[in-house]
Image (tube, helix red, strand yellow):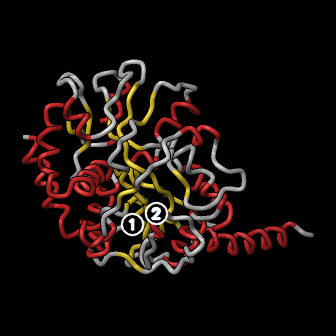
């Protein structure tokens, strides 16, 4: 082949390749910082989906899932986000009322979601139960109910998060309301002397437990699995509370403003495959909602079996959560 022909052929191939490269889409996912972190689920999900999608996945970490929703609301139709990932059942109805989310069209009927939680606009992808985590060496006899915690020595301190910016503490507000109903304000008043701080995020509050500044931190029944597997440390346990445990189901939804509707739907379908679900237990340290071929790591067998499970109706939560959060702050001031 002569040089001019080679050059012409190379130029032709280049012209074919350029549009394909230029058209490679980017799927942008707003989520909370811990999910997007290098130790979180995002890197594994990104590489797994990019292997099949012909696209680039861009996880954008925001301080919380509530913060991710607020950012998308402020940006409106100009937002670059295609998906909001990490909202949960306590804020799903509020998110739904924004009108930002499209129906996902993903078949979720085979998933193992506690309470059989399903929605046309949100795909559930993991779940957990709220609990207070403690160090058994520094707190050998932890309280086993909210009322035992209230009755404990005033030196026993707990670290919470702000329910206006943190879904775990919003979950605690709902936990106490579900367990005690009209007595919720009384329970909060009793807890007030034990609250070391109301931190902005789960990470900030949990760090106070690890540093020894707090005796207990609001987290999940599954949090001890992280210490056992990642650190080979069995000191941290979830306190068994007789009132039961409030359920959190994490969900993801597609924004109506997304120009990548089909790609976003494909990602949500991938998110509930066994491959993607296998990433969740040892990165997000909660339960997957799909069966895993090899099951969960053995450490999960040692965790509390939550019973009874508490969960309030989504619409009731949307209607009352601001009132119940105000009740909390008024009681603990």
At 67% across and 50% down in the image, what residue appears? 295
**Local crowd at mark 1 within 10 Å, few (<14), some, or many (≥20)?**
some
Determine the residue located farthest toward the top in the rendered image.
137
- Give percent across and percent down for residue 102: 40, 79
Query: Which structural element holds mark 1?
Result: loop
Looking at the rendered structure, the number of numbered marks drawn on it comes to 2
243 displayed left or right of 4:
left
Contact between marks 2 and 1 (CB within 8 A): the answer is yes
- Sequence order check, earlier mark of 2 and 1: 2
- Give percent across and percent down for residue 244: 36, 50
> Which label sits on residue 58?
none
Closer to us: 322 or 264: 322
**Local crowd at mark 2 within 10 Å, few (<14), some, or many (≥20)?**
many
Looking at the rendered image, the quarter that the C terminus falls into is top left
Distance Cα–Cα, label 2 vs label 1:
6 Å
> Which label sits on residue 28?
2
Quarter assignment of residue 147: top left
Residue at the spot of label 1 = 80
Looking at the rendered image, the quarter that the N terminus falls into is bottom right
- Give percent across and percent down for residue 89: 36, 63
In the rendered image, the vertical position of residue 182 relative to residue 206, given as above or below: below
140 displayed left or right of 174:
right
- Give percent across and percent down for residue 322: 16, 61
At 55% across and 73% down in the image, what residue appears? 108
In the rendered image, the vertical position of residue 144 relative to residue 181, given as above or below: above
At 11% across and 54% down in the image, what residue appears? 326
Query: Which structural element holds mark 2?
Result: strand
At 51% across and 61% down in the image, what residue appears? 125
């Amino acid at each position: 082949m002569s040089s001019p022909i080679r050059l012409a052929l190379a130029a032709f191939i280049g012209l074919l390749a350029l549009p394909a490269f230029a058209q490679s889409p980017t799927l942008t996912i707003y989520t909370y910082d811990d999910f997007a972190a290098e130790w979180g689920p995002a890197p594994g999900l990104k590489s797994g989906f990019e292997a099949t999608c012909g696209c680039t996945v861009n996880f954008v970490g925001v301080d919380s899932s509530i913060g991710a929703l607020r950012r998308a609301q402020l940006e409106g139709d100009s937002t670059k986000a295609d998906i909001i990932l990490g909202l949960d059942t306590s804020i799903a109805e509020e998110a739904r009322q924004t009108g930002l989310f499209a129906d996902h069209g993903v078949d979720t009927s085979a998933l193992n979601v506690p309470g059989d939680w399903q929605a046309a606009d949100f795909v559930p992808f993991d779940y957990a139960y709220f609990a207070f985590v403690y160090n058994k060496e520094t707190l050998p006899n932890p309280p086993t109910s909210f009322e035992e915690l209230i009755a404990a020595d005033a030196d026993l301190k707990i670290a919470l998060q702000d329910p206006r910016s943190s879904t775990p503490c919003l979950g605690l507000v709902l936990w106490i309301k579900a367990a005690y109903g009209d007595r919720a304000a009384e329970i909060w008043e009793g807890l007030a002397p034990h609250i070391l701080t109301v931190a902005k995020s789960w990470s900030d509050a949990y760090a106070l437990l690890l540093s020894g500044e707090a005796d207990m931190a609001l987290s999940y029944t599954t949090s001890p699995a992280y210490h056992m597997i990642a650190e080979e440390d069995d000191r941290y346990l979830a306190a068994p509370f007789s009132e039961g445990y409030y359920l959190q189901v994490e969900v993801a939804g597609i924004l109506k403003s997304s120009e990548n509707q089909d790609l976003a739907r494909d990602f949500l379908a991938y998110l509930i495959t066994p491959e993607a679900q296998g990433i969740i237990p040892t990165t997000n340290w909660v339960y997957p909602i799909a069966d895993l071929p090899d099951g969960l790591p053995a450490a999960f067998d040692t965790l509390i079996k939550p019973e009874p499970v508490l969960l309030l109706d989504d619409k009731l939560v949307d209607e009352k959560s601001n009132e119940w959060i105000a009740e909390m702050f008024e009681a603990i001031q």
